[in-house]
Image: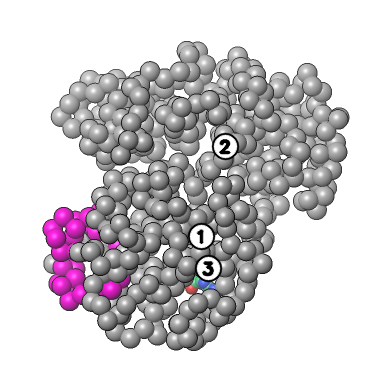
Amino acid sequence: MTDQHIPTPDSPCADTASAGAPFDQLPLAPAVLANLRQLGYLNMTPIQAASLPIALAGHDLIAQAKTGSGKTAAFGLTLLTNLNVRFFGVQALVMCPTRELADQVAQELRRLARSVENIKILTLVGGSTMRPQMASLEHGAHIVVGTPGRIMDHLQRGSLNLDGLNTLVLDEADRMLDMGFYDDIAFIARQCPAQRQTLLFSATYPEGIGELSRRFMRQPQEVKLLERHENDKIRQRFYEVSKEERLQAVALLLNHYRPVSTLAFCNTRQQCRDLLQVLRDQGFHALALHGELEQRERDQVLVQFANRSCSVLVATDVAARGLDIAQLEAVINVDVTPDPEVYIHRIGRTGRADQDGWALSLASANQMRRVANIVQELGSEPEWHPLSELQAASDEPLVPPMATLQILGGRKEKIRPGDVLGALTSGAGFTSAQIGKITVTDMSTYVAVEQGIAHEAQRRLATGKLKGKTIKVRIMDVSGDSPPRETAPASSRRKH
Ligand code: ADP
Ligand code: MG
């Protein structure tokens, strides 16, 4: 597998040619370079080569790359470069989602900083008592690595002062958002000097990242490493269809392969609308993502798809930009795209991590030229299958495993994921295994629950209390039986 560095559409990025280049072409102190050689770090990894020139030049940065790609050194070398050891104050703060990750990062930073004498790196994580941490802080630390909750505790008690900070790092930002740390991160970022460099690292790019960057970063540059796909993980199949068969063929594919989550790419918005209609008429739980949606509607669509309460998301390439879903069993190319790079980008959304994924493409006879271009780019032969071999694998309709409950009330009401989980488990007697992702936005909270308990969970929440108040809860519908439009109050997420 090789990594491909691709520029995001709206931001400049570093030179691909520097991947694998030696560290000594970077403006790093000689002692730091000597230490890297001792560590056996001779050449930069692709994410380091893409991000270090930007970060060392002082820019804010959003870097996206998979686990194990060397992200720690990418921000570690930057914060060391920004550091003045003679000043005994916290100059860099690294936020990590868990205590284990914070420990790992601190360890790697210590290795990278071996050449810098008298440097103090402190971890602040939950699970250990506050007192010793406070004592260590009193002695002065240059770099703090910790989890958002504990860092916030110290800030609120006044034991951590960030007035001298110059570098703020959000590591594994997607996981921190998943864990409901948005508010803590926001609180911490507000305690940092406005004049600072902010670096954000993430393996995926969920919507919340955009919100963080809009609020807390200054003209961040983005680098992204798209994995060239391991062919054995993404199984690609092509089906020849006539114009008339095309949309119906999508339903055949869904019934045959029965993926839990499918992203279906259309070339036009009209095709999105038509396909959504065809799928809903047949009872599929499908939603569409297109440019006409308001931000709030878009958020709701993405929440439902990401938490597995919508089987199919129908989208154009433009609408799906920046969308990153961890678990995606299938990508369907409803139409062949004329651009092979777009094809590679589309199918790269499936087959992530340890899972296999299907990339299924529908091509009409007049699109064979496009298929040939794709095949040339991929360097492998396409696997053609006849539509006639598609058999419904079950008589049961394809139903998503989860359903989404929308609670009217969110951050503004100080609702946290833990409150909702508590209300459903200790309050209503469900097990936490029956509860999926909980997403809190300014005005609404979305909670995924197993399909089979949706009505009961809705009833219990609506008759119980959350934060001492009765709440309005509804089940969000994706089957098409009722109008897809939402009736929640307009969001005010942008007004900060
Ligand atoms: P990530 O944060 O992207 O998951 P890490 O920063 O934890 O990745 O790095 C993964 C491993 O690669 C670590 O063991 C680290 O020591 C090693 N590593 C990082 N950069 C280099 C390099 N340029 N050359 C050799 N090994 C490296
Ligand atoms: Mg890491």
- The tag on residue 67 is 1
Where is residue 368? Give x, y as percent: 85, 36
The first of marks 1 and 2 along the sequence is: 1
Q: Is residue 358 left or right of residue 404?
A: right
Where is residue 179? Give x, y as percent: 35, 47
Closest to the camera, between mark 1 and mark 2, is 2
Magenta span of residues: 133-160
Q: Residues within 10 Å of mark 2 (few under 14, many from 20)?
A: some
Q: Which residue is mark 2?
A: 320
Q: CA distance from mark 1 to mark 2?
A: 23 Å
Q: Which residue is more in the foreground, 142 or 362?
A: 142
Where is residue 76? Give x, y as percent: 42, 70
Decide: is 168 above or below 29: above
Please indicate, yes or no, whether residue 227 appears anywhere in the rendered image: no
Which quadrant of the structure image shows residue 397?
A: top right
Q: Is residue 151 magenta?
A: yes
**Residue occupying image coordinates x 19% and y 64%:** 160
Where is residue 228? Give x, y as percent: 67, 55
Mark 1 close to ligand 1, CB under 8 Å: yes
- The tag on residue 53 is 3
Decide: is 398 above or below 426: above
- The tag on residue 485 is none
